Amino acid sequence: MSDLRRLKNKYLSNPRSPVVGFLFLLPVLIYIAIYFVYPFFYNISLSYHDTDVVSFVSGKSSFNGLDNYIELFTDSTFQTALKNTAIFTVFSLVFQFSIGFILALVFNRDFPGEKVLRGLVMIPWFLPLIVSASAYRFFFSEQGIVNGLLLSLKLISAPINWLTDPSLVIWTVTFINIWIGIPFNFVLLHTGLKDVPKDLYEAAEVDGAKGWQRLLYIVIPILKPVILTVLMMGTVYTIKHFDIVWIATQGGPANSSHLLSTLSYKLAFRDYEFGLGAATANVMVVIILLLVLGFGLISNERRANR
Amino acid sequence: MKLTREKRSELLWGTIGFLLTAILLIPVYLIITYSFETLQDMYHMPPYLFPPQITFEPIVQVFTDLRPYLMNSFINAVGCLLITLLTAPFAAYALAIFELKYEKEIIFSLTLSQMFPVVMLAIPIFLMYSNVGFTNTYLGLILANATYTIPFCTIVLTSYMRSVPFELIEAAYMDGASPLVTFFRVVAPVAKSGIATISIFGFLFPWADFIYALVITTQNSIQPMSVGLYKYIERYGLQWNNLMAGGLIFSLPALIIVILTGRFIIGGLTAGAVKQ
């Protein structure tokens, strides 16, 4: 009895007790182990095996070393997907960020109705992607509103195959993704801008600094950590993006619009080549980790330079 | 009447802000108007700015066709919200208040886990589920969807809980409250805006999920609305007004939540992203 009381006192009288804390954390740790750590290693193992439906069911998939990776890197669809992912990511980021930044600067001014409009700007980001992507699939279809408007204005003489022309389709899906990502960039940059001290701004104005000078020499340096975070998160989210492309094109026509994510899905769940699908996903993970490491180095360097 | 400089600038920026927002929202406007148009009017050239005649047929039609999917979406989102609320707040409490070994490493791995591509998780989770017969179950789908919410909500809530005054917690312990009672009586009430925020994400993320549903559910009876709509395009490819109406119905919960709780969402996003 006294032992129990001592034990109880030890753990329950210290509000920071590591043991109690660990117990509170435990459910999340177990979840992470099952749904992140195990899949992570399982996926690595899959990528070194020749796993299709038959071998998965029989449990006898053979180890084939780097074969999956070699097969991928020599495959033209994979190369296209790699190139598409680069186009999709770079152009999405450049435009989402600049448009989001412009919006953030505009909304940094006080004007009536600012709050309501700011809420409305968020909408594209919170529409379920199946809704926005399939709506755009109609807008960009042969008889859709985009062609309709361009034809009515006599800017084109025949409808453009936005989603069915292999050389065009990746640009169309990138456009859709830019639209969806603007609010995210906007919100984080706008919140960052609010932290820029107003008197610093006014002092610069008194000193005769022009709008763009204040932006370049005051706002951007102060905002740098926020900008880095937004760009890093944007890069990661864009590289792994799946929904828009799969809903709008399923990687087609003729595999011309695959991203690494849609290709990975197609290999695993359409072709039932789980090994190849896993290998494609792992290539994405490596790319993402390298980029995050790069961003980490940049922001640490900044800190060290201070 | 002469406007002051300040008023003029307000008017100028207000106009610019309004115009930019309007341009950005054109697609949303189109989704809404198309939902109340006949197919014929949708294809009219030049496009109508307002539907010449309003019809509720697409909404009624698609609601009849897809109601079970909508129900599944609710089950999935509410289930995921519950699981998130049963786990993330306690973990956040632990990370914010308690002295833990490897605290930094745990927070780092929670952050890292959000960088994994969903498809990278979906392949092994699907195979894992196939082994134990967990595909085509609500629980299987809900737990997979929690990969969106549990790490994210834990991180967001941890930053909220760091601001809970430690004196309050200490005082509760002095009064003989157990850690769990302290959590419910002291920590949760102080962090309630944080808990409200993660509840929004805990519902919205699984609501919008597409890929897990596509991978894990193959039976109609269990598929959520995202897959229902996806199949609708494939099956009735030309019924675009019905599809827009379905999209509108599916978006409504998200739109209502965003409009009502925008400031929580923004607070949560910044807590999750910038303050790390």
Image (cartoon, coloured by chain):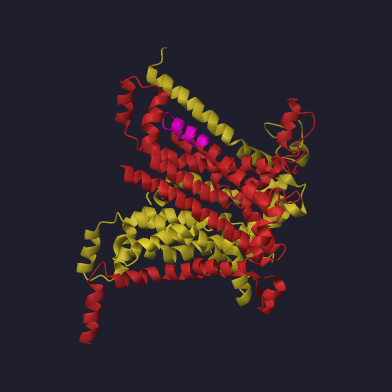
Chain colours: A red, B yellow
Residue B265 lies left or right of residue A68; in this view the side is: left
Q: Residue at x 46, y 49 (%)?
A: A294
Q: Report if residue A107 lies within the magenta region.
A: yes
- Give the total number of marks visible in the rendering: 0
Q: Report if residue A101 lies within the magenta region.
A: yes
Q: Which residues are magenta?
A: A98-112
Residue at the top extreme, as displayed = B1
Location of residue B238 in the rendering, given as x and y in whole percent from the top left corner:
77, 47
Nearest the eye: B38 or A160? A160
Quadrant location of the N terminus of chain B in the rendered image? top left
Location of residue B15 in the rendering, given as x and y in whole percent from the top left corner:
50, 25
Residue at the bottom extreme, as displayed = A1
Q: Residue at x 61, y 65 (%)?
A: B123
Residue A222 shows in this picture = yes
Give the quarter of the image for residue B167.
bottom left
Main secondary structure type of the part rendered in magenta: helix
Nearest the eye: A248 or B107? B107
Residue A50 lies left or right of residue A237; in this view the side is: right
Location of residue A229 in the rendering, given as x and y in whole percent from the top left corner:
43, 46
Vertical placement of B271 versus A159: above or below?
A: below
Residue B75 shows in this picture = no
Location of residue A266 in the rendering, given as x and y in whole percent from the top left corner:
69, 59
Vertical placement of B133 versus A231: above or below?
A: below
Residue at the right extreme, as displayed = A158
Residue A81 lies left or right of residue B183; in this view the side is: right
Vertical placement of A193 versus B62: above or below?
A: above
Q: Residue at x 60, y 59 (%)?
A: A281
Q: Residue at x 50, y 55 (%)?
A: A289
